[in-house]
Amino acid sequence: MNLTRILPVIFTAGAITAATVASAGAEAAAPSSSLYEGQQVVGTNVLAGTYYTAGPTEDDYGSCSITWLPYKGAKSSEATASDFYSGPSYVRLSAGDVITVRGCDWTLE
C-alpha cells in the first residue's frame, strides 16, 4: 500500500484535519462541572467552586465521602482530611485540591 498517495486524498477530502484533531483534544481536556467517582484534581479534571449534592443515592448505602489528598496518586492512607455526607450538602473546592469522591451526585452551583 502506498501511503504517499492515500494520505493526501484523505486530508484534501476533509475527513481528518489538524484543526479537527486539535479541537477534539481541547474539548476532551475541559474540566467538568460535576464530580465523579474516584480521584480528580480540582482545576484540571473538575472546576473549582461550590458543589451541591442532594445526598446519597440508593447505591451509596446511606453515605458518601470526599477525601483530600496531598498530591495526585497519593494513597488513601496519606489523606489530609475526609468528610462523610448523609444528606443534602455543599462542599467548596479550590484549584489544586486533590480529592477522591465516593458516592453521591455532585454538581457545581
Image (tube, helix red, strand yellow):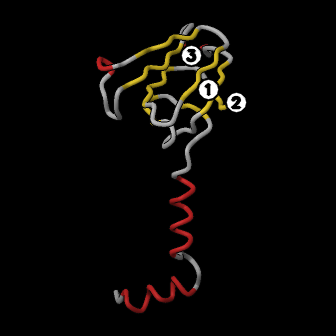
Q: CA distance from mark 1 to mark 2?
A: 9 Å
**Residue 68 sits above or below residue 46 on the image:** above
The residue lying at 34 percent from left, 32 percent from top is 71
Q: CA distance from mark 3 to mark 1?
A: 15 Å
What numbered label is drawn on residue 14?
Answer: none
Q: Tell me the quadrant of the picture where the N terminus can be found.
A: bottom left
Q: Nearer the viewer, residue 78 or 62?
A: 78
Q: Nearer the viewer, mark 1 or mark 2?
A: 2
What numbered label is drawn on residue 59?
Answer: 3
Q: Amino acid at mark 2?
A: Glu
Q: Which corner quadrant of the image does residue 52 belong to?
A: top right
Q: Nearer the viewer, residue 31 or 104?
A: 31
The residue lying at 51 percent from left, 41 percent from top is 43
The residue wearing badge 2 is 109
Q: Tell me the quadrant of the picture where the C terminus can be found.
A: top right
Q: Which corner quadrant of the image does residue 96 belong to?
A: top left
The residue wearing badge 1 is 106
Lower sequence index among marks 3 and 2: 3
Image location of residue 97, percent across then percent down = 45, 31
Q: Secondary structure at mark 2?
A: loop
